[in-house]
Image (tube, rainbow, N blue to C red):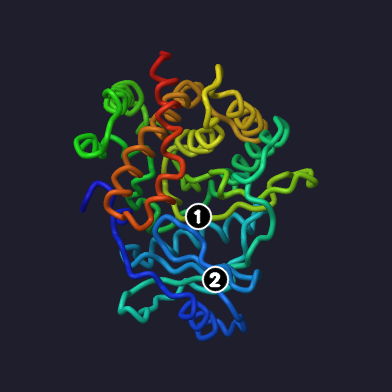
Amino acid sequence: MSALGELEADHVVMPDAEAVALARRLWGLEVDGAERLATEQDDTFRLDEQFILKVSNPAQGFDEVDLECRAMVHAGERGVPVPRLLGGPEAIRDAAGQDRVARVMEFLAGTPLDSTGSTAAERERVGETLAALRLALADFSHPAQGRRCAWDLAHLPELAPLLDVVPDRDGLLRAGFERYVQEVAPHVPGLRHQVLHNDFSRSNLIVDHEAREFVTGVIDFGDTVHTAIAIDVSTALLNQLPREPVDDLLADAHDVLRGYRRVADLDDLELELLPGLVMGRVIARALITLHRAEKLPHNRTYILRNTEPGWMQLEWFMERR
């Protein structure tokens, strides 16, 4: 398998009309239209502003999709605001002859966090929600939880071959990778692990500035995996980094961390490693997205949407010890 596994797999995209017919046939949904949503590797449709239909990349197995679905349901049963699973997962063969997995869930109306701002207090609510999700999944297990996910920082050292094929900037990416491997990676196996969301990004949070809880929905369990708690937290902190240079790159992330620790604990080693793990996620994003953009040029704009600010972010980390 390649360094990126299923993330390198391309597929024939499902037409909108086929998505509508699929929803009608499998689950009896009387929908009239489908709106394709930009995604990393699957086909996702919003149906009549009521439902979300997700059809997996053919490289993704049934058990992996089932892991995502069961983790989402488990979290919802414990009070985390997630979409209700309405049907599936169902193994299908699409019109292009590809074996895939489909599921349908409710559409959560609201504002994605990546399209609005947030106050310090609201960012603390983000941290509280992430901690609540961790606690909700603490007793969850699944046969596919040990799957290999390229976005899991536990596997970042395995991406070393990509350093020879992606564009670097004055050796910055290689230097950051080497620091991560030497200073952070050796400690990861000894950290506390459990099944976690692993993609608590602003695009995966639905928010309401008028609601006390602020976060009204957590979506996209596609990177769910058994990994280190600190890795899950670092992913959320990365997604609070500014896209333009500032003196304290981690200022907004500290608000998230403050809210998180109000609900769930982090031990001394986890706290010590967080900055290095955030840097590791910047490095992983650069390696993965730059390589995928070359392999999947038709999805280049979406794949690289967050890559450019990473150079500034990585430089900031490398200037500090």
Q: Say if 251 sits above or below 74 in the image.
A: above
Q: Say if 300 sits above or below 275 in the image.
A: below
Residue 113: x and y, percent? 63, 45
Q: Point out which mark residue 221 bears.
A: 1
Q: Residue 187's quadrant in the figure? A: top left
SS type, badge 2: strand
Residue at image coords 71%, 33%: 119
Residue at image coords 32%, 78%: 96
Q: Which mark is first along the chain, 1 or 2?
A: 2
How many residues crowd mark 1 within 10 Å: few (<14), some (14–19), many (20+)? many
Residue at image coords 42%, 36%: 308
SS type, badge 1: loop
Q: Compare residues 84 and 29 and report the one nearer the observer.
A: 29
Q: Residue 95's quadrant in the figure? A: bottom left
| Residue pointed to by mark 2 | 104
Disc 2 versus disc 1: distance between alpha carbons? 13 Å
How many residues crowd mark 2 within 10 Å: few (<14), some (14–19), many (20+)? many
Q: Compare residues 180 and 49 and report the one nearer the observer.
A: 49
Q: Compare residues 303 and 212 and report the one nearer the observer.
A: 303
Mark 2: amino acid: Val
Quarter of the figure that contains the C terminus: top left
Residue 120: x and y, percent? 70, 30
Mark 1: amino acid: Phe
Q: Point out which mark residue 136 bears.
A: none
On screen, residue 165 versus residue 73, left or right, reads: left
Q: Residue 102's quadrant in the figure? A: bottom left
Residue 251: x and y, percent? 60, 23
Q: Compare residues 133 and 216 and report the one nearer the observer.
A: 216
On screen, residue 21 versus residue 164, left or right, reads: right
